[in-house]
Amino acid sequence: MKGSFEVRSVEETWDLARQLAAELGPGDVICLEGDLGAGKTTFTQGLAAALGVRGRVTSPTFCIVQEHAADPSAGGTVPLLVHMDLYRLHGEDDVLAIGWEDYLARGAAIVVEWPERAGTLVPASARHVVFHHLGEETRLVTIDI
């Protein structure tokens, strides 16, 4: 999945996330970029729902990492969705210290906000999802690999 998409609601954001979730596999990294309130957490909630995650998905701003077990009966191949907010970290050593490599070894899909803090740890195969405000309710979401 690649392209630019206008979304005007939570439902449209979740729909876009569901489409991307269908392509995810173990060890995939999804880099989320965009201003505060641009839709990164809403998009992650849609990914989680599509992967069969039960329970609430919130921003990991203060806890840095949140783990969400996926339900294999939902049809996905990802056993674990890990949502990271690297804003408070200072580089690759900090990212390694919170378990980056361990999560990938466990077959997790990692959704990461502030991916530039991970430096060279972000694989070339990572999907980049960029959110831009177009208006009060409209966002432009660009997905690239």
Image (cartoon, rainbow, N blue to C red):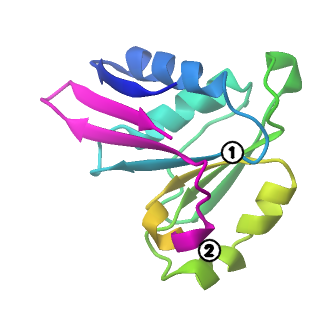
Per the image, is 140 magenta? yes
* Alpha-carbon span between mark 1 and mark 2: 16 Å
Task: Name the secondary structure under disc 1.
Answer: loop
Tell me the residue at 29%/44% (across/down). 37
Pinpoint residue 118: horizontal percent, then vertical percent.
54, 70
**Above or below, comparing residue 40 to residue 88 in the picture:** above
Per the image, is 126 magenta? yes
Among the 4 quarters of the image, the one containing residue 112: bottom right
What range of the chain is rendered magenta?
A: 119-145
Tell me the residue at 45%/34% (across/down). 42
In screen coordinates, is 143 left or right of 105?
A: left
Mark closest to the chain's N terminus, 1 or 2: 1
The amino acid pointed to by label 1 is Asp
Per the image, the residue denoted by label 1 is 28
Pinpoint residue 124: horizontal percent, then vertical percent.
58, 55
Tell me the residue at 39%/15% (across/down). 12
Task: Name the secondary structure under disc 2.
Answer: helix
In screen coordinates, is 53 left or right of 122?
A: right
Callout 2: 10 Å neighbours few (<14), some, many (20+)? many
**Above or below, comparing residue 58 to residue 138 in the picture:** below
* Residue furthest front in the image: 124
The amino acid pointed to by label 2 is Val
Per the image, the residue denoted by label 2 is 95
In screen coordinates, is 125 left or right of 109?
A: left
Callouts 1 and 2 close, C-beta under 8 Å:
no
In screen coordinates, is 125 left or right of 6?
A: right
Give the label, 1 or 2, closer to the camera.
1
Pinpoint residue 40: horizontal percent, then vertical percent.
42, 42
**Above or below, comparing residue 91 to residue 49 in the picture:** below
